[in-house]
Structures are given as structure tokens and as C-alpha cells.
Amino acid sequence: MRIDVVTIFPGYFDALELSLMGKARDRGLIDLHVHDLRESAHDKHRTVDDTPTGGGAGMVMKPEPWGQAIDGILADAQSAPAAEPLIIFPSPAGDVFTQAMARELATEDHLVFGCGRYEGIDQRVFDEYAERGRVRLVSIGDYVLNGGEVASIAMIEAIGRLLPGVVGNPDSLVEESHESGLLEYPSYTKPAEWRGRRVPDVLLSGNHAAIDAWRHEQSVERTRRVRPDLLGD
Ligand SMILES: O=C(OCc1ccccc1)c1cn[nH]c1
């Protein structure tokens, strides 16, 4: 999968050099290109923002640098025989990102993440690329960040780890929270007793049917307590 990111803070994405994402990149499973939006701003001060037309507080990101940056990526992608890239703009006003959306996005050949800052990006950027390609505004939760970088990293990690070959043991992807529609059961490891706290006996019993039943019950109980909305009943 090719992933392009457009941002005024490219340094944020050094985090993706680490650990799992770093390995995925080294093994060619993820081809990440980070673009500094200011390189597409050609006035003397490399201006990427301006005051909101119609008044109001804060600043809005100008459309021209975004147009040049995204056009450059689409042109580059044209040369590679991949499908039309999906352009994702993290936004508090977007569709909520879920594990199901991560699974869906993991099937894409090419994703572009546009990291907004300030009060957001001029609406005409979304309109331009919605016509020409595929655009999605995506929220990672009901709170406001200063920009789309952290949201993009979260989504890239959630998507990247689902790509075949990125996670060592794919079985570990199946029993995760939200994969089964339930929250994950509590986990334990050695020692069997720690500060007087014992691991539940069923887990030491070797009776795998009983262990599976206990784990499922724990998942259902935890989901009912913490996230009844996931149970849909
Ligand atoms: O704050 C967010 O995106 C960054 C952003 C984008 C545009 C303008 C300001 C901030 C966000 C919150 N949940 N999901 C995304």
C-alpha cells in the first residue's frame, strides 16, 4: 500500500519509522511519502493560511498550496498503475473511524492523508477533489485536536497493522477488541500469583473449552458494562 501524507509538520511522522510501521516500511508493505505543505506555497513567506472570509476568529488554510500538493501526488500516482487514491482529511466533522473502516481502508492500494490545521482547510479543496477523485472526512473521536497529524498517525497504525505480513501472528488480530464486535477479555501471564493476586483458576485448568467459555463471558460482561452501545440490543 502506498500512503502519502500532506502536513506542515512532517516531523510528526517520524513516529511511523518506529517498530511495526518501521518494519512494514522496510519490508515494502507500506510505501510512505510525507510531503511538507509549505513546499507547495510559493510566496516569499510560504504562506499556507489566511483570515476567514466573512470574518471570525482564527485562520483558514489557503486552497492553492493544497491544490498543488495534492495534484503533485495524483500525478505521481498516475505513473504507478494503482487505483484512484482515496484522500482522507481528519476532521471533527467527519465519519467516525472504526475497526470496520480500518479493515475497509486496508484494502485500498493508495491512501492520501491531508492534515488540516488552524480552523481547517478552505472548503473548495474538499469540493475540488471530491469531484475529481475520492474524498473522505474522518473523525477519530468527539474531541478537537490542533491538527490532523495525530489522527492520521492513529489511522495509519490501525490500517497498517491489518495489512498481510505486518503483524507477525495474524491470529492475534482476530481476538482483539472490536474485531468480534465485543471488547477483549482480561489477559494474564506468569507468575500465577502476584502480590497475593492469583490468575483465575479456569485459565490454569488446561480445559480449553472452559477457558474459551470464560473468556467469551468476560468479553460480553465487559462490553455490557463499558460499551453497551456495541451490543446493539
Ligand atoms: O481535530 C481533529 O482533526 C484535526 C483538525 C482538522 C481540521 C481542523 C482542525 C483540526 C479531529 C478530532 N477528531 N478527529 C479528528
Image (cartoon, rainbow, N blue to C red):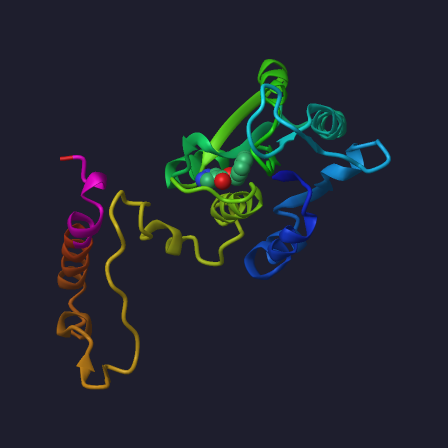
Residue 139 location in percent, x, y? 44, 36
229 in the magenta segment = yes
Query: Which quarter of the picture shows residue 180?
Result: top left
Q: In this orientation, which residue lies closer to the viewer: 214 or 186?
A: 186
Q: Magenta stretch mostly in which secondary structure?
A: helix
Tell me if 172 is positioned left or right of 195 in this view. right
* Extent of the magenta region: 222-232
Q: Is residue 11 above or below residue 232?
A: below
Query: Which residue occupies 61% across, 25% down?
Result: 52
Q: Which of the image's four quarters has the C terminus? A: top left
Q: What percent of the width, then of the height, locates residue 48?
A: 72, 34
Front residue of 58 and 204? 58
Q: Residue at x 76, y 25 (%)?
A: 75
Residue 185 in percent (x, y) is at 24, 58
Quarter of the picture holding the N terminus: top right
Q: Residue at x 74, y 29 (%)?
A: 65
Placement of 4 over or under 224, stated as above or below: above
Picture quarter containing residue 96? top left
Q: Report the side of 224 relative to 71 (left or right).
A: left
Q: Nearer the viewer, residue 203 or 146?
A: 146
Q: Is residue 176 left or right of residue 14?
A: left
Q: Residue furthest bottom?
A: 195
| Residue found at x 70% / y 42% | 33
